[in-house]
Image (tube, rainbow, N blue to C red):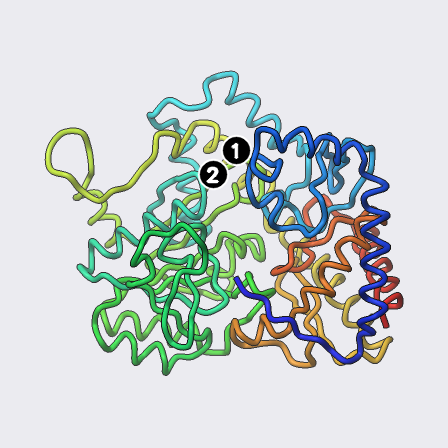
Amino acid sequence: MTINRLKPTVIDRERLAALRQSEDVAFRDRTPKSAAAHERARAHMPNGVPMTWMAGLWRTPPIYIDSGAGPYFTDIDGNRYLDFNLCDLSMTVGYGNAVVAEASDRQARRGATFLAPTEDASVVSEHLAARMRLAFWQYTLSASDSNTEVIRIARFITRRPKIVIFGGHYHGHIEETLVRDDHGRTVAETAGLSPGSAAHTIILPFNDLDALARVLAVGDVALVLTEPAMTNCNVILPDPGFHEGMRALTRRHGTLLCIDEAHTFQFAYGGLSREWALEPDFIVLGKGLGSGIAFSMYGMSEAVALSVSANLDGDAGPRGIALGGTTYGSALALAVARAMLEDIMTPVAHARLNELGRRLADGLEAAFQHRALPWTAFRCGPRSGYCLAPVLPRTGDEGYQSLDIELIDARRVYMANRGIWDAVASAGPQASIAHTEADVDRYLTTSGEFLDAIL
């Protein structure tokens, strides 16, 4: 991912740099135990963290966490943070949710996994079929795994090699999608990928049906993989008619369509696919549905499911489609998924999330207008954020242009020093089930104080 360093003239860069410097000092002063824990960890973990993103997503030293409750977590120095990052949407329920804790504890005591199905698998699949309007489901550990399997199925069914994704995408840490556009050429975005990993991936501008039509007409694309709204360069909404046009084009040219709702499932009841009446061949859900437990799932149409069923890859007989993993579809994951769908992610809960999201977006826009800033707020369900332009972007490139990494970094550390944990650079703050209106108002007040400090 590349974030362009847009530098709006309304920001006093000298004040911004000075604020960032002083806030960095304050951050280190309030986290000495985390600093000591980090130094100890560096002896046995690269960058002193168990997973590289824990160091790579922030421009401040890692903090080590003691516990969490509701919308808050507390570090080992005793600092308490009101969380608007939600572990990049994997903790939408908040910390220590009683329903998730009870379901996971109960199933762990009965057996976490068996490499065999439990009845919860059928119940969850029935719920998903009703909610998401795709009849058949499979389970993995992450959306990266689910997207990998979807690509394999699409290539098998179509006997075609290529996939299409859109600029500004993120579909997991898989070789086909860890790519970027380099003046019309698809190249690897990160180190360590196999040679030629980008050879079969085409990157197009979001909302550009003409470009999609030209590419699909060649007849070698197995799958179009997209989010319903782009969420890795803040939020890019589809133009009216874009999804309908994409569905018509993929059907005309024999290409399968996958809607990746790893993020956006939380933006509406049944995700944006249901909200917008989309008709994909696949839907991918991830991040444990916001439960904090690692699992993912993907749905497929009946026609796709028939092909998957007929081409089982087992120990005996002919080899089929390469799908599955030892801990996929575990009893623990399915027990938590059932609790999420039946008891937590209800229509009432989604309506409340969206109301909090509107309050957040309206408050940010009011703050910009009050300070005569030519900006607007992203908004999609419970998510919002700073758009440093008067008009919302339509493509990934425009989305990156609406971000300012220096501003984001300074805001993150400023907010953290005042007890608020802000979103990762490519996203924006999001409300959770555990948040209240007062929590949103606290974020808005502190955000406004930050703006006053840099203007």
Mark 2 touches mark 1? (CB < 8 Å)? yes
Q: Residue placed farthest to the left in the image?
A: 317
Disc 2 residue crowd, few under 14, some 14–19, many 20+, Cα 10 Å: many
How much space separates mark 2 and mark 1, taking CA atoms? Answer: 9 Å
Q: Position of residue 324 (x, y in %)?
A: 31, 37
Specify the amino acid type for callout 2.
Phe
Q: Residue placed farthest to the front in the image?
A: 43
Secondary structure found at label 1: helix
In this view of the protein, can residue 352 be seen by the observer? no
- In this rendering, the answer to whether 372 lies above or below 83 is below
Q: Residue at x 50, y 66 (%)?
A: 168
113 on left or right of 281: right
Q: Position of residue 379 (x, y in %)?
A: 65, 66
Q: Position of residue 360 (x, y in %)?
A: 75, 61
Secondary structure found at label 2: loop
Which numbered tag is attached to residue 295? 2
Figure disc tally: 2
> Which quadrant of the figure has residue 145?
top left
Q: Residue at x 36, y 72 (%)?
A: 185
Read off the residue under disc 1.
336
Image quarter of the C terminus: bottom right
Specify the amino acid type for callout 1.
Val
Which numbered tag is attached to residue 72? none
Pointer 2 or 1: first along the chain: 2
406 on left or right of 120: right
